[in-house]
Image: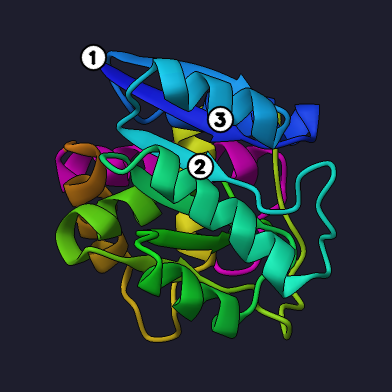
């Protein structure tokens, strides 16, 4: 049974991150902390296998590099056996590199944090030891969601839309298959189901 801690002061974001993790991990207990004090108390009494950290917590100057790194270092020191992932709306490559030197395994921008991306990050960490997702300042595409899609269908569409130029659909099926433990043929079936639903509504987003 994994214990996971999400340190995030914004209630909606904290609950969204918890829900995202619940969808990708089996047999896990998740706790949320809105402040550093609450988080430190929890880490004193509990052993966590995964800790998500927002460094811009209440009482911290979110524009101060020293303050932000202090939060991260305190959390890492208080939970040395955990895997740590920083999730921030003020991302930078410099901060990501410093986090890596501090022992953080993942660094993710909140900008562009779509369904399934956090699972991709955890998969990358498990295989490569570190994962980084910096925001794309040149992003010009719109988000596209349809209420008639299941969570899995939406996730696969999102993955397909953000694939790099030249990446074939088959490669995306295989990447998702490896990450979630489902056969590529099943991923393809989900994709085609989602695409058919959108075609019936007469609307296909770019990249699909």
Name the N-terminal-most of marks 1 and 2. Answer: 1
What range is drawn magenta here? 183-208
Q: How did the renderer colour the structure? A: rainbow
> In percent of the image, x 54 and y 61: which residue is there?
108
Say which residue label 3 marks: 40
> 33 or 79, which lies in front?
79
Direction from residue 191 to residue 172 in the image, left or right: left
Question: Which is more N-terminal, label 1 or label 3?
Answer: 1
State the image coordinates of residue 158 (x, y, percent, origin top left). 54, 53
Instruction: Give the percent coordinates (x, y) of residue 196.
Output: 52, 41
Helix, strand, or loop for circle 1?
Answer: loop
* Image quadrant where one finds the N terminus: top left
Q: Of helix, strand and loop, which mostly describes the magenta segment?
A: helix
Q: Which mark is residue 39?
A: none
Q: In the image, 64: left or right of 109?
A: right
The residues bearing labels 2 and 3 have C-alpha atoms spaced at a distance of: 13 Å
Residue behind mark 2:
52
Quickly name the residue at label 1.
1
């Amino acid at each position: 049974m994994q214990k996971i801690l999400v340190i995030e002061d914004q209630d909606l974001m904290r609950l969204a991150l918890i829900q995202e993790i619940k969808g990708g991990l089996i047999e896990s207990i998740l706790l949320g902390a809105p402040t550093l004090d609450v988080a430190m108390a929890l880490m004193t009494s509990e052993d966590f296998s995964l800790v998500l950290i927002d460094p811009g917590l209440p009482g911290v100057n979110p524009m101060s590099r020293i303050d932000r790194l202090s939060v991260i270092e305190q959390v890492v020191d208080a939970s040395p056996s955990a895997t740590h992932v920083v999730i921030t709306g003020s991302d930078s490559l410099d901060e990501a590199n410093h986090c890596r030197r501090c022992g953080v395994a993942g660094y993710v921008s909140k900008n562009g944090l779509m369904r399934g991306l956090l699972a991709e990050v955890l998969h990358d960490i498990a295989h490569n030891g570190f994962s980084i997702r910096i925001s794309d300042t040149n992003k010009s595409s719109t988000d596209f969601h349809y209420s008639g899609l299941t969570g899995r269908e939406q996730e696969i569409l999102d993955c397909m839309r953000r694939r790099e130029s030249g990446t074939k659909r088959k490669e995306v099926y295989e990447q998702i298959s490896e990450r979630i433990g489902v056969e590529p043929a099943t991923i393809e079936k989900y994709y085609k189901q989602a695409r058919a639903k959108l075609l019936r509504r007469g609307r296909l987003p770019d990249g699909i």
